[in-house]
Image (cartoon, helix red, strand yellow):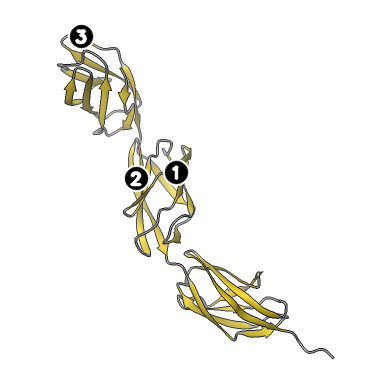
Amino acid sequence: MPISPNQGPTGGGNTVTITGTNLSGATAVKFGTKSGTITANTPTSVTVTAPSGAGEVGVTVTTGGGTSNPLAYFYVGAPFKASLSGVSGPTAGGNTVTLSGAGLATASSVTFGANSATPTVISDSEISITVPAGAAAGTVGFTVTTAGGASNGLTYTYVDAPTVTSATPGSGPTTGGTATTLAGTNLTTTTSVTIGGAVASFSGVNDTELVVVTPPGTAGAADIVVGTAGGSATLTGGFTYVAGPGI
């Protein structure tokens, strides 16, 4: 006589279905010593609202013909969320974040605002999630649902992809050291800048510009790539390295 689901929150209130034979006319369903509320009954099934409880209990069905053998049912505590490995990412989604906490082994779904995703359970203290696309840039609530209930309290911020439109000045010596201002959009969360593939230091970041100090490079045009929480943007040939004079 299977029971589905065979686990649920300690607070009860979830729907449980028991299947078997000769179940019509069920008068009681017990979860340990507590009674569930019968909501539907046929000769082959009983649907019941589980009462509150804790740990493992035996579930029995009583009809005019007697009481069934017990089936194991497990009460699961609500999940606890400690932290997200990444609290922001591109509005397009597709990046992976990890949630750390406790009671996560039965995680079945997570939501980022109104958008849902199915987690990959790593352990009772960790799940991995591929972030779904967001409706728009901005901060949304993050909720995880397990057999023990739902837990919120954390937030996640969607960030639009950056653009880079110009570099001023746009040229300098191959020895590097030129301070150039990059103009664009959605630059506030800049995490990296490369010029010609070499890492450049940056400062003075706001949403529309940042100041970059060029690293040494080879003569010629070099691509500028800016990485942010929302993705990356490339200004092709955005800076030209100029060789010094030779005598």
Which residue is labeled 2 in the image?
Answer: 151
Q: Quadrant of residue 238?
A: bottom right
Image location of residue 141, percent across then percent down: 34, 55
Q: Residue at x 46, y 42 (%)?
A: 120
Density class for disc 1 (Cα within 10 Å; few <14, some 14-19, many ≥20) is some
- Left or right of residue 208: residue 60: left
Density class for disc 2 (Cα within 10 Å; few <14, some 14-19, many ≥20) is some
| Residue placed furthest toward the top | 65
Mark 1 vs mark 3, CA separation in Å: 44 Å
**CB under 8 Å between discs 2 and 1:** yes
Image location of residue 43, percent across then percent down: 19, 17
**CB under 8 Å between discs 2 and 3:** no
Which residue is labeled 3 in the image?
Answer: 66
Q: Amino acid at mark 2?
A: Ser
Which residue is labeled 1 in the image?
Answer: 101
Most foreground residue, 192 or 135: 135
Q: Residue at x 64, y 85 (%)?
A: 171
